[in-house]
């Protein structure tokens, strides 16, 4: 595979640098996003280690006292984005949103350490306690009953905002009649056909209003909030990150934390079974308000490979389903099953291909020796970028670039593959 856009990728990352932290793309996303930023660190690591760690250090500057690393760190307001800090009103310093995003940070830290030198070891050791507190937050605030299944309280917390996975839970939300009038900004930057709908935004904001009205009491939000779902994406990403953090705990001689991580891992492995949907032959999201599965697989279902989750038989079945999904598109991995009715190849998380998801899927597949599938996902991603450029997401049927352009995490994944900075087998 030829990498003809390396300089362009580096330039995008530099251009999106706002002085130690990176925005995903100008105007559409003008702040620091949690998982975008962690992937940005991976991209920076291919050409500037110091800058890579600075990205993570600045991300942890937004960490709350309870350990949560919020999904957006605002630092300052920006009229290009809605909903900004005045809507969230979290009273945090720096200002931030009130829930989290997929916890990939520890996995990126481990990659940087294993691929790096003494410098990386020291930087990771200095951030270890913060990463550990973040994981504790996930296990306690998002699984207070210790079921082994962590939940999300807002579709934005999954990172897969408008995926059909959330249609059931979102459909049961009555839009708060007290919701203030608002003006979206995203659809003034991007074609509305590539973004969530108006009704989805009303519901997204109804959930935000609930959090704001209870002073961001995370326990109250989990128990009584308008939305609660189990998400294979979050479940697998946290399980993988727990394992990666365990490796770092052992490396740094942190015995107590290692023991705690081992027990979280054991519980989460059990919890994965709660997402196994026999009818679909895979891991599916579940609306936890009604205890109802979604009826289709997504690209997040295939993150079981990233976490090495499930039994050998379960993973073989997911691989079979994955091949069937891939037969129905030109470019994998579609974010929703193309065989299903609600598939929309242009609309955000309802069909398009995302480079960071592909990175995790392909790494996991490679580690599990499913080489043909790993190669397909990786080759498809690189072809999309080579042909269309560094877009936020891509049409799985036509290969067109969609959403924001000059996108940080797409550039980061391209550089990561170009430089061979890749995942190692989770313990
Ligand atoms: C957005 O504004 O679309 C973000 O994805 C929410 O985090």
Image: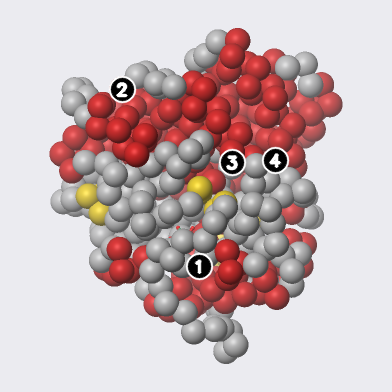
Residue at image x 70%, y 28%? 128
> Do the numbered discs 4 and 3 sit on residues whose CB atoms are within 8 Å?
no
Which numbered disc, 2 or 1, marks the residue closer to the eye? Answer: 1
Residue 135 badge: 4
Q: Which residue is mark 1?
A: 83
Q: Is residue 265 left or right of residue 398?
A: right
Mark 1 or mark 2, which is nearer the start of the sequence? Answer: 1
Mark 4 or mark 1, which is nearer the start of the sequence? Answer: 1
Q: Which residue is mark 2?
A: 418
Bin the neighbour count of mark 1 within 10 Å (Cα to Cα): few under 14, some 14-19, many 20 and up: some
Residue 323 picture location, percent across and down: 31, 41
Q: Is mark 3 within 8 Å of ligand 1?
A: no
Q: Is mark 1 within 8 Å of ligand 1?
A: yes
How far apart in space, not on screen, are marks 4 and 2 (Cα)? 30 Å
Mark 3 or mark 4, which is nearer the start of the sequence? Answer: 3
Q: Secondary structure at mark 1?
A: loop
Mark 2 or mark 4, which is nearer the start of the sequence? Answer: 4
Which numbered disc, 4 or 3, marks the residue closer to the eye? Answer: 3
Residue at image x 43%, y 66%? 79
Quadrant occupied by the C terminus:
top right
Taking the view exactly as shown, the residue that stands out farthest to the top is: 118
Q: Is residue 51 left or right of residue 152?
A: left
Residue 208 appears in the figure:
yes
Q: Secondary structure at mark 3?
A: helix
């Amino acid at each position: 595979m030829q990498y003809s856009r390396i300089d362009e990728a580096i330039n995008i990352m530099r251009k999106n640098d706002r002085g130690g932290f990176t925005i995903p793309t100008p105007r559409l996303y003008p702040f620091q996003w949690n998982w975008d930023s962690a992937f940005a660190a991976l991209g920076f690591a291919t050409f500037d280690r110091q800058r890579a760690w600075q990205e993570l250090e600045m991300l942890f500057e937004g960490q709350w006292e309870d350990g949560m690393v919020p999904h957006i760190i605002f630092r300052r307001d920006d009229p290009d984005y809605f909903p900004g800090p005045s809507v969230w009103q979290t009273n945090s310093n720096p200002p931030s949103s009130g829930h989290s995003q997929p916890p990939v940070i520890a996995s990126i830290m481990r990659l940087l350490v294993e691929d790096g030198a003494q410098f990386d070891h020291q930087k990771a050791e200095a951030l270890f306690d913060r990463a550990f507190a973040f994981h504790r937050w996930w296990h306690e605030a998002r699984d207070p009953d210790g079921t082994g299944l962590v939940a999300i309280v807002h579709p934005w917390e999954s990172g897969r905002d408008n995926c059909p996975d959330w249609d059931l839970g979102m459909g049961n939300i009555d839009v708060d009649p007290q919701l203030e009038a608002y003006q979206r900004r995203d659809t003034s930057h991007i074609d509305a056909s590539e973004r969530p709908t108006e009704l989805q935004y009303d519901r997204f904001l109804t959930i935000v209003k609930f959090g704001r009205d209870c002073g961001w009491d995370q326990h109250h939000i989990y128990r009584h909030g308008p939305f609660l779902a189990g998400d294979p994406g979050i479940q697998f990403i946290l399980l993988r990150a727990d394992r990666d953090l365990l490796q770092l705990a052992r490396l740094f001689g942190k015995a107590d934390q290692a023991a705690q991580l081992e027990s979280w891992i054991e519980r989460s492995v059990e919890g994965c079974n709660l997402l196994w949907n026999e009818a679909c032959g895979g891991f599916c999201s579940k609306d936890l308000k009604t205890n109802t599965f979604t009826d289709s697989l997504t690209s997040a279902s295939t993150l079981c490979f990233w976490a090495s989750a499930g039994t050998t038989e379960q993973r073989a079945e997911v691989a079979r389903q994955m091949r069937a999904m891939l037969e129905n598109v030109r470019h994998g991995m579609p974010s929703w099953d193309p065989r299903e009715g609600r598939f929309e190849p242009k609309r955000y998380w309802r069909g398009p291909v995302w480079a960071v998801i592909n990175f995790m899927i392909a790494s996991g597949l490679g580690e599990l020796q499913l080489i043909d599938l790993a190669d397909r996902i990786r080759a498809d991603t690189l072809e999309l970028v080579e042909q269309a450029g560094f877009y936020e997401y891509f049409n799985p049927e036509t290969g067109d670039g969609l959403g924001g352009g000059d996108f940080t995490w797409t550039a980061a994944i391209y550089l990561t593959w170009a430089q061979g900075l890749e995942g190692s087998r989770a313990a």
